[in-house]
Amino acid sequence: MIKLHDGGVYLVNGTTLVEDNAQAEAAINSAVGKSISKEEAAKNTIAYGILADHNTSGNMDKLKIKFDKLTSHDITFVGIIQTARASGLEKFPVPYVLTNCHNSLCAVGGTINEDDHMFGLTCAKKYGGVYVPPHQAVIHQFAREMLAGGGKMILGSDSHTRYGALGTMAMGEGGPELVKQLLNKTYDINMPKVVGVYMTGKPEKGVGPQDVALAIIGAVFANGYVNNKVMEFVGPGVSNLSADFRIGVDVMTTETTCLSSIWRTDDTIREFYDIHGRTEEYKELNPGQVTYYDGMIEVDLSKVKPMIAMPFHPSNTYTIEELNANLMDILDDCEKKALVSLDGAVDFTLKDKVRNGKLYVDQGIIAGCAGGGFENICDAADILKGASIGSDEFTLSVYPASMPVYMELVKNGAAATLMETGAILKTAFCGPCFGAGDTPSNNGFSIRHSTRNFPNREGSKLQSGQIASVALMDARSIAATAANKGYLTPATDMDVNYSNPKYHFDSNIYANRVFDSKGVADPSQEIKFGPNIKDWPAMSELPENMVLKVVSEIHDPVTTTDELIPSGETSSYRSNPLGLAEFTLSRKDPAYVGRAKEIQKAQKAVEAGKCPVEAVEELKPVMAAVKEKFPEKDFHKESSIGFGSTIFAVKPGDGSAREQAASCQKVLGGWANIANEYATKRYRSNLINWGMLPFLIQEGELPFTNGDYIFVPDVRKAVEERKTEITAYVVKDSTLKEFTLKMGELTEDERTIILKGCLINYYKG
């Protein structure tokens, strides 16, 4: 089904794989009649060509990328625009689309969600953007329908910004990276490695895109095979997939932790652009005659079976057949994983869902950028035609990804078919993906064609003693399970005549409702500010020396951004930095906020010209020990010393691109993270853009514990002098124990941002 190659691989003539070994040159010469160096062959990837077209540095090893278009949703665009405004924004320099698909329901807080929407609309008018009202489309479906283009690049402030199937290299990053683009700056990265995904065969009837995606994620996540690399989909099997199928696989590449994705394109993708009235945006993309990839994933589509990702990660994958055959053993393994993910905060079991030897689920959801596509929903309707989901606990909700998709489902009868079964059709909304819609009951088990199944991402709250859980599945197997009234069933067990209706896109829906400035700004437009929309608090520059208190210690193998700052109803506070910060680590370490605020008192005292040790009593022995070790340092000098907090996590930052996972720590006085590694580039970038030091220590080395103080002498000088290692000291029991903090490579801009204290300060000068 899935094969990973140990080293580099050449793709010859698009159909032959040649391992990078001693025989490679002869094999390539025999096939194409010439030799080619690895370096030249690496330039023949689709990814290289697109990156070269968008690079402004003149150096393909050190890229400075300018994107063609930008997109954000209503959890992120307020903070982004507020940051850009504080940094001198006058006009959106490239098309910038603001969608409203996350805070579409008023879960909490009265008017604050709609206040954010009005902020977005007035900013689109003032700065020359595009505003997509609530319920019209989820961010990524609108981008597919209206923004994507062959050979183009799009940057979005959402981690699932992936339009590779349409020939567009797209990346999901934290808000500050979009701020840079809005201020005509660049996205600076080293040339990423490119891993090929070589597809052969054709999917079995009943197998959908989520099945293929989960099979790939299960094979590559834990070993980091594609971490921060570009996945390039090639091979003859690509042509056996519809555009919707490719899109459904592509959007889930985010869960592999890759940087971006790109696919070869063909007449199927040309037809997609034709259907959407944008024929001119199609571009044929193929790898060169001889192309070198840094790794290769072989996918035999004909061998992929209906899959399920059990709680609490998309990589916890099994075939549904395997799960049903080994049910109690796999459920026992889920309980063991829950002990790690939930820290024993609540009792968790799925064994009570086993009835007469079969697994019963309480809820099915088909939604969002992954599940809400036209083909997924039509196939689900075909499976459910004439069936009933029953009148017991099981429920089924379906969220078409855009109003044009919804309209076509109404016109072709699929909507009526689904509603007749007892299913509920809802408008375009990302809520089920991040815990703001269709939260199950306590101990409920939901199967979803959505993007993630992290702990509590379905909306339950550990701090209230609640737990529910999600397994990821394809829409087809969700529909098969619904037809069996909640008993887990793979779609391949159903004898279905799939109708495969043709899609017709009606652009009038957007023409009649979406505000499009056509790039024309109106400086006279007043921005509407709701009372919850707050400016960022002032942030200090990096001091010469630093005292950090460890205020949280997390030893999970991976820490998600959902655990750093919860999703769900808390998202309504995303426009209020101080209000949102109160939720930081609330599900993982509820004491974090109080601890961080306590040490922040010392920094506030310094900024007010007062004595920090009088503000925080426990600093007295710490500073006494530091002064004894470093008597030459004058800590009374302005900017000589700063105080703040840090957290340790083994591998933080998997999941969402949300910058708030970092900015909330900064708002509470965070100066650094310490980790063995960072799960994604985007989380590390978020730390840097908020002026936080991305420290690293060796795995297995932990010279401090929660509550300890760390003194980092000459930290500013170390950053200025481009040092990658910094000597630090654990201050405990009046003694200082030396250890080493590493930082990894930083660009010159990143160093300056850290020195200035955050991106806003950097642009203020």
Image (spheres, rainbow, N blue to C red):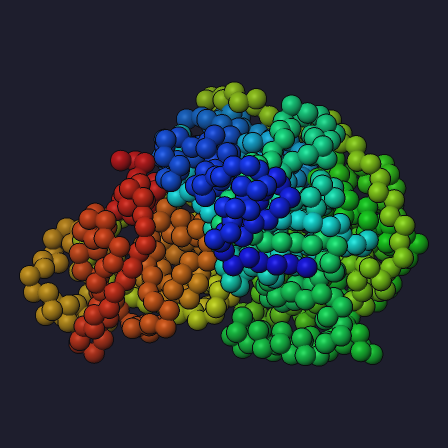
Q: Which residue is outermost to the left?
A: 632
- Note whether residue 470 is visible: no
In this rendering, is residue 637 above or below 190?
Answer: below
In the rendered structure, the answer to whether residue 363 lies left or right of residue 336 reads right
Say which residue appears at 41% left-offset and 65% top-offset: 649
Q: Quadrant of the N terminus?
A: bottom right
Q: Quadrant of the C terminus?
A: top left
Residue 9: image location, x then y, percent: 53, 50
Foreground residue among 310 and 598: 310
Counting the numbered discs, the total is 0
Residue 33: image location, x then y, percent: 55, 37
- Note whether residue 247 is visible: yes
In the rendered structure, the answer to whether residue 765 lies left or right of residue 565 reads left
Q: Residue 85 occupies which quadrant of the picture?
A: top left
Foreground residue among 153 and 142: 153
Residue 556: image location, x then y, percent: 47, 70
Residue 615: image location, x then y, percent: 23, 64
Say which residue appears at 70% left-offset and 30% top-offset: 270
Foreground residue among 27 and 285: 27
Q: Which residue is outermost to the right?
A: 386
In this rendering, is residue 39 above or below 740?
Answer: above
In the rendered structure, the answer to whether residue 118 lies left or right of residue 210 reads left
In this rendering, is residue 384 above or below 41?
Answer: below
In this rendering, is residue 759 above or below 184?
Answer: below
Say which residue appears at 21% left-offset and 47% top-offset: 720
Q: Residue 244 occupies which quadrant of the picture?
A: top right
Say which residue appears at 82% left-offset and 36% top-offset: 502
